[in-house]
Image: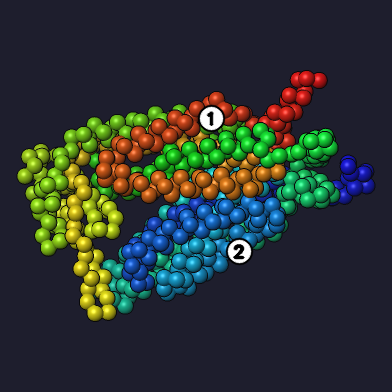
Amino acid sequence: MALSAAQMAVGTKRSNPVIYGRFLILIAGLGGLLYGIDVGIIAAALLYLGKTVSLTVAQTSMIVAAVLGGSTISSLIGGFLADWLGRKRMMIGSGLLFVVSVGMIVSSHGFVLLLLGRLLQGVSGGVIAVVVPLYLAECLSAKSRGQGSAIFQFMLTVGIVVAALTGLYYTTHAEAAIAAAAGNQVLIYAAENHAWRGMFLSVIYPGFVFFLGAFFLSESPRWLFRKGRKQETLAALRRSSSEEDAQLQFREMEELAAESQEKAAVPGATDSLLRRKYVFPFLLACVILACNQATGINSILAYLVLILRQAGMSAAHSTQGDFAVKLLNCVMTIVAVALIDRRGRKFLLTLGTAGIVVALTFVGFSFHRVESQHTDVKAQMQAAVKDNALTIPISEVRAESGIEQTRASVLTVLYSYGDGERVASVLSDDKDPVLRIEPETKQTSSQSQTPAPLIIERATCGPVPSGMTGWLITVGIALFIASYSVGPGVVVWLTLSELMPTRIRSAGMGIALLLNQGVSTLIAGIFLPVVGHHGYYAMFLFWAGCTVVYFVTAAFFLPETKGKTLEEIERYFDADRHAQSQTT
């Protein structure tokens, strides 16, 4: 039932929509910043964490992976909780969880509290990834929704850079303090301990701002309307939109609700979740989210320094390239933010995925041209094993295999001690170009356990790409990052929230994000084994093939949603409504 004139008058005294809109985007953007920090802050902290806290290799791996595990859990339930408690309360809760997680990590002195803190940090990030894009899509008008939602992705990339700069700052000061300690172990321990704790503690401040700022936001008008709180719905719309736009959006909500009631009143008619208006956009969003990770974005960013080293870049140039690529990610995201409401989601996603296919294919064949020249040295490596360990200079391997000595070479060995495959590699231009493999000894209460025998699964030695090839591969990766930033990087979050109908939006987003993170975890898990068995070219060409599916989906199945309200998008997928309109 429509609101009366008296009810319409409620909430007429309101703040400037422009000012409130900027505040809303600022707080939501901080959510993206926290999500990026969650992903990136551990990298530099690992340099000192293991030196001041007693951790096994397995425990260190669990602490690194804990954020992904926590995010996976919260992505699954975050959408359902957002439907129950509301978007605003979940944002407040995620901010509180982030602040508490940092406190737990900084105050920890052992594995258990560290693990719990990282899990909680992941839970916070997963809730943010579900709720913030959802909240933006439901609060912003059709004209500003694209640009406003793109800010979330931009701030996510900023968060990754902030984490890298934070690590660089504390690492530089720690190394200077360690050098000044002149071997004093007490001072060295203090410097290392301060470094990793300082990295985590420094990021608590944006967490506080996000947590406190969320209190001053309005609840999502779409969520309020679904709960029957119509007066609050109109008041929330008026805070972020002009009076005319607020009234228009409110009428569309009522019209869509009336249509659903009319259909429900028809004998035998049910608003089944298996209808096309729910199933097709949900499946479309799932394909897009899965393909988004199948581009290899997370693995490329995580292993970029190693990839550039394998491409022939020096260690210094590889590190600089890593930072440059992350900076390029930010810059191109700014470009995408400016274009998303002008050129549209479909155009940017199609353009971006096409660029990714070209970039990944180019890099894949560039690596294949070099890796096809590698020589199988498995027998030589197995013969060199002594006392269940392997220590061999790469120069010796090259000499026995007749590999050209004038060019830089790389020796890669895939091996196991009966507990899973591992990869070790060494480059001829390393400061210590010697490959060393030895078992990890584990002490029991009485004696050391005897390790399983060392088995060489695969070993190759061959030339590293030339300097020119290295720069070409770097350019290819830069094209990949630029294409991803302009297309999938920005569009995917907005597309996800726009495609989902109101009834399934929060739950559907949670399930789609769970699929997204599952694919990311799978690809991260197979990266090193595939590279060890087949080479880098195999992964890049695999990612290119997956992105072809992404391109086809974007070009031929994704509707353009630029300038359309969420209610108009929902009607687009309602096949029953289209059929009725054609027959009447």
Query: In which quadrant is the N terminus drawn?
Result: top right
Residue name at image x 70 percent, y 31 percent: 574
For discs 1 and 2, the disc positioned in front in the rendered view: 1
**Residue under pointer 2:** 96
Position of residue 576 in the picture relative to residue 289 (left or right): right
Q: Measured from the top left, where is residue 394 in percent x and y?
A: 13, 49
Position of residue 286 in the picture relative to residue 406 (left or right): right
Residue name at image x 22 percent, y 77 percent: 447
Q: How many marks?
A: 2
Q: Which mark is residue 554?
A: 1
Is residue 14 shown above or below 566?
A: below
Q: Is residue 565 visible?
A: no
Q: Quarter of the image holding residue 571?
A: top right
Q: CA distance from mark 1 to mark 2?
A: 37 Å
Tell me which amino acid carries mark 2. Answer: Leu
Q: Measured from the top left, where is residue 98 in percent x and y?
A: 55, 62
Residue name at image x 25 percent, y 58 percent: 418
Query: In which quadrant is the C terminus drawn?
Result: top right
Tell me which amino acid carries mark 1. Answer: Ala
Say whether disc 1 or disc 2 marks the residue closer to the N-terminus: 2
